[in-house]
Each structure stands twice: as structure tokens, then as C-alpha cells.
Image (spheres, helix red, strand yellow):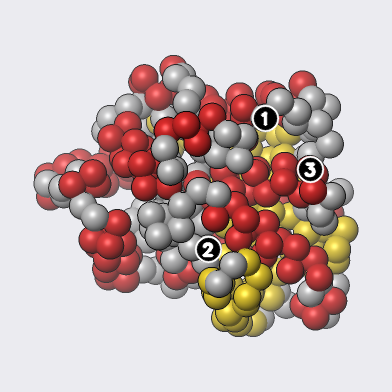
């Protein structure tokens, strides 16, 4: 179907403003511009019973900020460990606050949002190891937050979807505590593959080939890392014995086909995987409600899908 009119208008306005290409900016400049733009346009999210910021020490010398959203009720609750996107280079807790509130409010789950170390300061595989360590910490502290250990999901968008998928593979291979579900929102799962959606949506839809190469250059030590399953989970030799998956894709997203290919590969390996493609949408749409208020309906739909999995 055609590109959603609200996104068509947004992209046209961005084009008219003449924003410099991402590749011309340092990571620090890009983060600053992103945070300033978001702060100016931020819309309030849904209410939840309690929000708490913590800093935990789980991997290396880094102190990891997390934000814990708790729903109304007495519990015990299901939980979602949320790993944000941003090309492994940018993103902070506030920018994903509305989506986490939607999950907590609608799915009735505790949501733990993870502010992992960003590249290039923390290159591959540091974010993987840090997010895996946080996931194990959540299992160890489940009782403290009135969380059901049998209903702890992990999920994220874009680069966060990549990290979520990889954390599940690492948990399986190391015998760690395994999430009950992986919620992968337009995930980056193959840093090498060429797909039809990358060809069709290579420019003009927010995420483009230029920015994808920029992010990979910041995240990876060399392009040789791109073939490692901890960077490209679709390339793993064995996808058996992983948690069931919900995979969300967007029609006008370069990453659309690889996300759907990952769901198909999971199914072939005997792992249940549900795919939902949102027609007329672009990459990152679920976190663009501050620009396109109509996105709230899609955010709620995804949260309802999570709620269904928690109650099955």
C-alpha cells in the first residue's frame, strides 16, 4: 500500500530542512542532535503505577542504567527486558519511554529498559555481553520486582532487536536463563545480506544504506565481524531451542526482508514465530509517536500481541 500520509509529510519536511547526512556527523554530534530534537517534540506517555531508575554493575567496568516500569496490581507480573535501537550508536532511556509505558500499561508487564554502552566507545561484542548480563540479572532479581520467572520476555527495535535475538542465542549456548519470548521489532539480523527490501527502500525512508553503513562502521571492529552470529544472528548455524518469537516489520524498511527471513528460519528450526508486517510504515515507526501521533494505534497493537503471548 502507499506510504502512510503522515510519514510522507514527515519525510518531506525533513528533506526540506536539509538535515546533513548521518555519515557527516560524529557519534557525539548525532546523539546531541537526536536528543535535542526529541526533547523539543516529546509527547507524554501512558501512566503506569511506578517508574524507577537504577544503575547496576553486571559487566566489565561499566555501570548500566536501567529503568523499571511497574504496572498496576499486586503481581506477580510477566516482564519484558527492552533493549532500544539506534544503530548501536545512539538512543537513551527517555527516547523509548513512551513505548515502554505502552507495553507496561497494555500488556500488564514489568518493563526493564536497558541503557547499554554505545558504539564506538563500546564496540562489538560489548553490547551483546552487557545485555546478556542484564538479562541474567533480571532473572536473579525477579522476586524483588514481583516478576514471574517463567514469563520473562526480551525484545527491542532495530539494533535492539539484533541484540535481543543474539542474547537468546547466547543464553541457549551458555546454559543461561532463557527468556520465554523474543519480541523483535524491525530487527537488524543480517549485516551482510542483500535483499529486495534493501534495494527498494535504500533511500528516502529515514533509514538508508548510507546510515546503515555508518552504524556498522561504528559498531564493528572490522567488516569481518559482520559474519559472526553474535553480530548477524540470522547466520547462526543452529536456530533450534530458542524462545518463540514475534517479529514486527515495516513495508518501507530496508530491514523488512531480513526480519521476515529470520522468522522463517526460526520456524524451519522448530521455533514458533509470528510475523506482522505493518503496511505503509517506515523503519522506526513505533518510536516516532512524537512526530506522528497516529503511531499510538500501532504501538498498542504490538503491546496487545505481547499481552496475548503472556496470557497464553
Q: Residues within 10 Å of mark 3 (few under 14, many from 20)?
A: few
Residue closer to the observer: 285 or 136 = 136
In three-dimensional space, the C-alpha distance between marks 1 and 2, rounded to whole angstroms, equals 23 Å
Judged left or right of residue 2, residue 133 is right
Q: Position of residue 5 (x, y in %)?
A: 32, 39
**Residue 215 showing in the rendered view:** yes
Q: Position of residue 179 (x, y in %)?
A: 78, 52
Q: Which residue was labeled with disc 2?
A: 116
The quarter in which the N terminus is drawn is: top left
Q: Relative to residue 94, is residue 129 depicted above or below?
A: above
Judged left or right of residue 143, residue 157 is left
- Quadrant housing residue 48: bottom right
* Comes first in the chain, label 1 or label 2: 2
Q: Which residue was labeled with disc 1?
A: 236
Tell me which residue sits at (78%, 59%) in the image.
Answer: 152
In three-dimensional space, the C-alpha distance between marks 3 and 2, rounded to whole angstroms, equals 22 Å
Tell me which residue sits at (32%, 41%) in the image.
Answer: 214
Residue closer to the observer: 4 or 286 = 286
- Quadrant housing residue 249: top right
In three-dimensional space, the C-alpha distance between marks 1 and 3, rounded to whole angstroms, equals 11 Å
Judged left or right of residue 124, residue 21 is left
Amino acid at each position: 500500500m502507499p506510504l502512510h500520509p503522515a510519514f510522507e509529510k514527515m519525510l518531506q519536511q525533513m528533506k526540506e530542512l536539509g538535515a546533513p547526512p548521518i555519515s557527516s556527523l560524529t557519534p557525539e554530534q548525532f546523539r546531541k542532535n537526536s536528543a535535542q530534537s526529541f526533547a523539543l517534540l516529546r509527547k507524554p506517555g501512558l501512566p503506569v503505577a511506578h517508574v524507577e531508575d537504577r544503575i547496576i554493575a553486571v559487566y566489565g567496568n561499566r555501570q548500566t542504567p536501567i529503568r523499571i516500569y511497574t504496572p498496576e496490581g499486586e503481581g506477580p507480573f510477566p516482564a519484558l527486558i527492552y533493549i532500544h535501537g539506534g544503530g548501536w550508536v545512539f538512543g537513551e532511556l527517555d527516547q523509548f519511554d513512551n513505548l515502554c509505558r505502552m507495553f507496561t500499561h497494555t500488556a500488564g508487564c514489568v518493563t526493564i529498559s536497558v541503557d547499554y554502552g554505545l558504539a564506538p566507545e563500546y564496540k562489538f561484542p560489548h553490547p551483546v555481553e552487557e545485555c546478556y548480563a542484564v538479562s541474567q540479572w533480571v532473572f536473579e532479581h525477579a522476586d524483588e520486582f514481583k516478576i514471574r520467572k517463567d514469563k520473562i520476555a526480551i525484545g527491542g527495535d532495530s539494533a535492539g532487536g539484533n541484540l535481543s535475538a543474539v542474547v537468546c542465542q547466547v543464553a541457549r549456548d551458555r546454559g543461561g536463563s532463557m527468556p520465554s519470548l523474543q519480541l523483535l521489532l524491525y530487527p537488524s539480523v543480517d549485516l551482510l545480506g542483500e535483499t529486495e527490501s534493501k534495494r527498494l527502500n535504500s533511500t528516502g525512508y529515514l533509514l538508508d544504506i548510507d546510515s546503515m553503513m555508518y552504524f556498522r562502521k561504528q559498531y564493528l571492529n572490522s567488516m569481518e565481524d559482520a559474519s559472526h552470529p553474535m553480530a548477524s544472528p540470522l547466520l547462526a548455524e543452529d536456530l533450534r531451542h530458542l524462545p518463540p518469537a514475534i517479529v514486527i516489520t515495516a513495508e518501507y524498511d530496508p530491514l523488512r526482508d531480513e526480519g521476515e527471513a529470520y522468522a522463517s528460519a526460526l520456524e524451519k528450526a522448530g521455533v514458533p514465530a509470528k510475523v506482522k508486517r505493518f503496511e505503509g510504515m517506515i523503519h522506526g515507526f513505533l518510536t516516532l509517536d512524537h512526530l506522528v501521533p497516529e503511531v499510538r494505534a500501532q504501538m498498542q497493537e504490538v503491546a496487545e500481541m505481547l499481552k496475548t503471548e503472556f496470557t497464553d
